Amino acid sequence: MAARQEFSSKGLHGARVDEIAERAEANKQRIYAYYQNKENLFGEVLAHCFNEIAQNEQALLQLGERDIPVLTEKLLSHYVDFHARYPFFWRMLAWENLDEKRHVKTLPQARQQVFAHLGRLYAQGQERGNFKKDVTFETYLFGLMAVSFFLFANQKSSAESLKLDFSKSKVRDQFVKEFARLFDVA
Amino acid sequence: MAARQEFSSKGLHGARVDEIAERAEANKQRIYAYYQNKENLFGEVLAHCFNEIAQNEQALLQLGERDIPVLTEKLLSHYVDFHARYPFFWRMLAWENLDEKRHVKTLPQARQQVFAHLGRLYAQGQERGNFKKDVTFETYLFGLMAVSFFLFANQKSSAESLKLDFSKSKVRDQFVKEFARLFDVA
Amino acid sequence: MAARQEFSSKGLHGARVDEIAERAEANKQRIYAYYQNKENLFGEVLAHCFNEIAQNEQALLQLGERDIPVLTEKLLSHYVDFHARYPFFWRMLAWENLDEKRHVKTLPQARQQVFAHLGRLYAQGQERGNFKKDVTFETYLFGLMAVSFFLFANQKSSAESLKLDFSKSKVRDQFVKEFARLFDVA
Amino acid sequence: MAARQEFSSKGLHGARVDEIAERAEANKQRIYAYYQNKENLFGEVLAHCFNEIAQNEQALLQLGERDIPVLTEKLLSHYVDFHARYPFFWRMLAWENLDEKRHVKTLPQARQQVFAHLGRLYAQGQERGNFKKDVTFETYLFGLMAVSFFLFANQKSSAESLKLDFSKSKVRDQFVKEFARLFDVA
DNA sequence: TATGAATGAGCCTTCATTCAT
DNA sequence: TATGAATGAAGGCTCATTCAT
């Protein structure tokens, strides 16, 4: 979908239907026939982005017990890679969070399965002493997501306040490793 | 400034000059006389928000050596409180980061001083074993900021994916404590 | 024809070709093949409505000399019934009269025959003293048509200005009788 | 108001806001500032037309007992003149009656006063034998209105079916007189 | 024959910005 | 200094009509 491009870069109100139609090499009436209005289309794009991350997360189901020692690093690099390859997500997420209205009702069920799987690994890791016992999985996961999201969502501003250029993958990789250390025991 | 209200809630493009003028009980001529155009005004508001956080951070200069053991918790609760009391910031920051153009050139110098001060405390903490030696202060601080920002900026969506309601201060407090544990050694 | 429904309720400009095609379970190509364009189709519908009233009026040819004493009542109830059963007519007539362009060229010849027949009965009635000698048939007929048309065409507004509800058939019947008295001698 | 011209000739949906603005030598934003939207403006115009007829009817309050013998003729010629001088009314009325939505809530109270006055005269006329005892005032008035409305509202079509040209005032005057005879006793 | 898509224009409505008083 | 009006350009959405399959 070419609408993703427009919406992710300009948001619901900034995007122009004409532009979308042109990029999609479709014509407006087709768009309105399918989606009724701009807002619906935005919702579809948003849902698509959520599906994208959900699908992408399926790979995490491959993680097993032996990955527990490097779980944090793997998760972090997974999300950072995702954001790097698929910048639409954090942008659409940000637009949606800034908007008063909610445009996506149901979040993909698929994510819950992955989270459950990771939760089990985390619990095992806690037993083995890889993760802190007094930190819940939700906190841990939230931290990982926050950090990876912020890495991209705040690139422009943080680049100036922290004097770092996250667009270089080396810098990013170093961050992943450092954050892995931060999040893990010892 | 009443423009802050409009811009923070609707963004540069969503905000309406008429609305701003009306709320400010000023008239449009005044606005255009002072700021030339909407974009400039947005920049001023943004700068104002950055000054706000910078000023607020001055309080952190009070932190001293004896606070090192609870530094993480203090910093986190500082930022979380700030976001809770001053929701304009994360919103303006998010709008700015989503926009192609940069509307603020210079970030307040004041922040650097605070960061330097905190950096010294962190270094001492590393010596004393409160913080991990292999995690830089930048990483540490970035983590704190990311987590506190994400707590608010992603409230709508995360409420659904993680089933948590961050609007309750209890939940937030618990998070602060958990994250403090996560970020600290042992 | 399903176009009648659309045109009569929304007029030439308000009606939508897509809607008509859908209701007719035909496809647009068919419509354009037969009628060239929307306006022609409107003309056909209009003509159809005129034929409908003309055909309906054929029943009036049954009226004979013995009906002269109740001619007014019979004619009035005929037209009122027609409008009640066939609301398309007054609406299409109203649309047509409001539009600058004329969409129907020829009015059905059949009506003239009926009018001539009624004219003869009226003349006889005048001789016999049933109808006023100084009121022409045209005036008389025009009055009947005006009253029955207005009864329906002005229902919404008159309901409020005259506090009457013509949708109730009782009220209508009473009106027919009263108007018969009004139009007849003594 | 120039909107009256547009709306009365093309109806709510046929009228063009640009056209109205241009004719009014105003600009669109003024229109939208005052009336919010096209429909409201239409409602105002409609209300204005109702006020016009109501105001015009005030003249009928001058009619007194001595006018009773020629009441019908006076009323008819009043309405016919009004329609001839002010063609906006019947058109706006017709548009409104064809439209599903109601655009005017309250009809002018002033009309009721006039109607009451005329009703009293009619009652006296009934006593004196000028009007039929078994025909109510409502019927009588409705008839007058219907006839005068139809005279204009159906001019285009009736011109063809009845072969009469109501645009000539002579023809109209003759009609007024004939209808007066029709409506009056003897 | 029937269908989905395309076109191109038009219309209502909204803005940022500027004039004029 | 403050206010109402003006401007000019969009932008969302809709339609009648036509193509192409």
Image (tube, coloured by chain):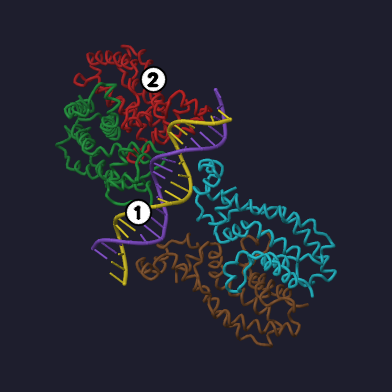
Chain colours: A cyan, B brown, C red, D green, E purple, F yellow
Q: Pointer 1: what residue?
A: D29
In x, y percent, where is residue D27? Answer: 31, 52
Identify the amino acid type marked 1.
Answer: Gln
- Image position of D69 (left or right of B169): left
In x, y percent, where is residue A88? Answer: 61, 56
- Image position of D50 (left or right of B125): left
Residue closer to the observer: D142 or A129: A129
- Image position of D157 (left or right of E9): left
Q: Quadrant of residue F7?
A: bottom left
Q: Quadrant of residue C48?
A: top left
Q: Chain of mark 2?
A: C
- Image position of B42 (left or right of C113): right
Crowd class of label 1 (few under 14; some 14 to 19; many from 20; radius 10 Å): few
Image: C31 above or below A84: above
Q: Residue at 66%, 66% (x, y): give it.
A: A146
Q: Quadrant of residue D138?
A: top left
Q: Chain of mark 1?
A: D
Can you name the residue that lies furthest to the left here? D66
How far apart in space, not on screen, are marks 1 and 2 (Cα)? 47 Å
Task: Note whether residue B33 is visible.
Answer: yes
Q: Residue at 64%, 78% (x, y): give it.
A: B75
Number of marks: 2
Image: D38 above or below B12: above
Residue closer to the observer: C91 or B89: B89
- Mark 1 near mark 2, Cβ–Cβ under 8 Å? no
Q: Pointer 2: what residue?
A: C51
Identify the amino acid type marked 2.
Answer: Asn
In x, y percent, where is residue C22? Answer: 52, 31
Image: A181 above or below C98: below
